Amino acid sequence: MVADEWAEDFEQLVDLIGGTDDVKAVLQGLTGFAAGMMTRITTTNIECAVTLRRRKRTATIGGSSDRAVVLDRIEQALGSGPCVEALDSGVPVLLGDVLSDPRWPEYSSALLAAGVHSALGVPMTLGEDSAAVLNFFAPQPGLFTEQVVADAVLFAEMASKALRLAIRIAASDQRGNDLKAAMENRTVIDLACGIIMAQNRCSQNEAFDFLRRASSDRNQKLYAVALEMVNRVSGQQPTTAHFED
């Protein structure tokens, strides 16, 4: 591939990541770029699916076509094939011709029935507990030459860097959202405790114990009980939250 085509692909990947905080959506979009890149190189229509493994769970996330998704899922169901082997080994695995390659006969039959004659699994490294594989499908044997495989590996390396960034962004956003929610919950609970302290002339610990008992008695979360109390007071409605003797 020429340099300007690689630059264009990388810019599109960056735009894809910048446009979504959903890693699954990034992976789905990535298959379109990957299929387009391989189609340009081989001058033949190449389809692509992506498989993601996180915490020992493996699933087909998406593909450039419905057929690619189906074929990838068949391989996952069988538990064997170039994509599965690439995921386990961490190196590219080529099924050059379904009619002559003796490996994975059941999967080769499924590929042949779908009009696919060769397949290529190219792994991507995402992190300690995550990995993915781009699974390419070609309608003819012999299209995935040594140079084409090398280009696919280079693209996968570029995609891996982009995906690691997407995962970090998603994780950072989630941590930020969790922290924000925790702070908001804590604020509401502290306000409710202040209301109880003012009404009952008690300590903060005693006010919190009251909230906790009310939460248990009503089978509601502590935050929900606190929010109800704060809403009543802010609405200038009298509250009946008092300690029982």
Image (cartoon, rainbow, N blue to C red):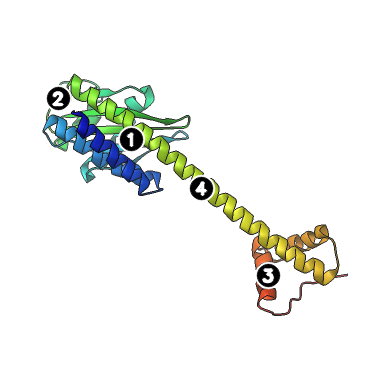
- Image depth: mark 3 or mark 1 in front: 3
Relative image position of residue 74 (x, y in whole percent): 28, 37
The CA span between labels 1 and 2 is 21 Å
The residue indicated by pointer 2 is 99
Nearest to viewer (mark 2 / mark 3): 3
Q: As drawn, is 57 to the left or to the right of 70?
A: right
Label disc, if present, on residue 174 of the rendered structure: 4
Reading the chain from its start, which is encountered first: label 2 or label 4?
2
**Residue that carries the numbered disc 3 in the rendered image:** 230
Mark 2 closeness class: few <14, some 14–19, many ≥20 residues within 10 Å: some
Tell me the CA gap for discs 3 and 1: 52 Å
Locate residue 86, reporting x and y percent.
Answer: 33, 25
Count the labels in the image: 4
Give the quarter of the image for residue 208.
bottom right
- Dot 2: element: loop
Which of the labelled discs sits on residue 76, or is there none? 1
Q: Is residue 143 visible?
A: yes
Q: Is residue 110 visible?
A: no
Q: Give the amino acid type for the residue marked by disc 4 in the picture.
A: Gln
Q: State yes or no: discs 2 and 3 in contact (Cβ < 8 Å).
A: no
Whether label 2 touches label 4, CB < 8 Å: no
Q: CA distance from mark 3 to mark 4?
A: 27 Å
How far apart are labels 2 and 3 at the CA level? Answer: 72 Å
Which residue shows up at 84% across the image and 61% down it?
203
Measure the C-alpha gap from mark 4 to mark 1.
Answer: 29 Å
Q: Nearer the viewer, mark 4 or mark 1?
A: 4
- The quadrant the N terminus occupies is top left
